[in-house]
Image (spheres, rainbow, N blue to C red):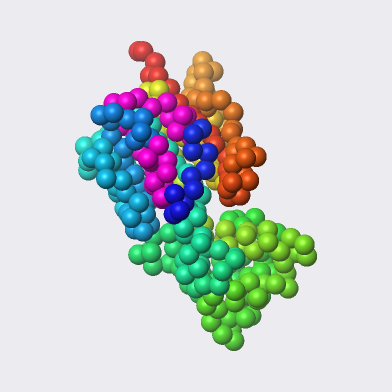
Amino acid sequence: MMYHKPVLLEKSVEGLRIKPEGVYVDATFGGGGHSRTILEKLQNGKLFGFDQDLEAEKNVPDDPRFVFLNHNFRYMRNFLKLHGVTQVDGILADLGVSSHQIDEAERGFSTRFDGPLDMRMNQMASLSAGEIINEYGEEELARVFYLFGELKNARKIARIIEKERQERIIETTSGLMNILEEVAPRGKENKFFAQVFQALRIEVNQELEALKEFLEQSEDLLKPQGRLVVISYHSLEVRLVKNFMKSGNFSGEVEKDFFGNPLTPLVPVGKQETADQQEVTDNPRARSARLRIAEKREKENG
């Protein structure tokens, strides 16, 4: 568990309503905490674990019921099909960055450590945070910070970066933070830099596009009454998950048939869950976690 302490472990696994003979997907394997708990509840079932970070492979359990797939969950349907699986009983995703990735300074995810501007979850990917900072045009930079960091002063941030990189290449996380210190709101510096880093991380890893593809594939892959369990953290992904579970699309608008019946493939189960105070005390990263569960509708006869 040193690699990553799983958030909302019991509630999320319970949400899957595991059948001992069922087939399940842990779409964000990471340290394997959720997967190990799922395996405890399986008998002759099967569990597929996805993770694009090859380092996660070190945590794979020695269990014939488990298959590790070193791929982004946006390719879930294709790789399950390669293994002869077209329908599953449940899918779980914990969208947070793993503790291991944050705590490894050389990965560049954390505002607490000095490291290269990397932020790639898949270390074989070509685009890094450094390339965004040094090569994106000013307008594109502003777009990233505004859309993915929800920063109101995104244009000013982009202008400062543009001016600075005329003089030198911006190579490190601390170098970027030093440059932007002048526009960080007093008393809210930590939140500001967290938003800056979030924006870069989302752009580097195409997180929102990957999440949309994952959610659409989940709906297709689930058997009737199969469960989708998602733990999300920031408002952008929370909104996508909430809207999709409610309406089957990302706008949140529920479409209806000729008779006024909702055309929603999933049915939300219960209310949004959050970590209790004890878990937040034990694991501060659980503070922003939001757990939602949905169930695939039964097909109507006729």
Residue occupying the point 45% across, 33% down: 13
Q: Position of residue 77 (x, y in %)?
A: 32, 41
Measured as percent of width and height from the top left, residue 237 is found at 55, 46
User: How far across and how far down the image is residue 15, in percent?
Assistant: 47, 29
State the extent of the magenta-drawn residues as a range: 12-37
Residue 277, can we see it? yes
The structure residue drawn at horizontal position 61% and vertical position 63%, both measured from the top left corner, is 196
Residue 34 is a magenta residue: yes
Residue projecting furthest to the top: 302
Is 97 placed left or right of 149 in the picture? Answer: left
Describe residue 16's horizontal placement relative to residue 259 as left or right: left
**Where does the image place residue 125, in percent across and percent down from the top left?**
38, 64
Task: Specify whether residue 9 is painted magenta.
Answer: no
Q: Is 147 above or below relative to 136?
A: above
Position of residue 247 in the picture relative to residue 53 (left or right): right
153 vs 190, nearest the viewer: 190
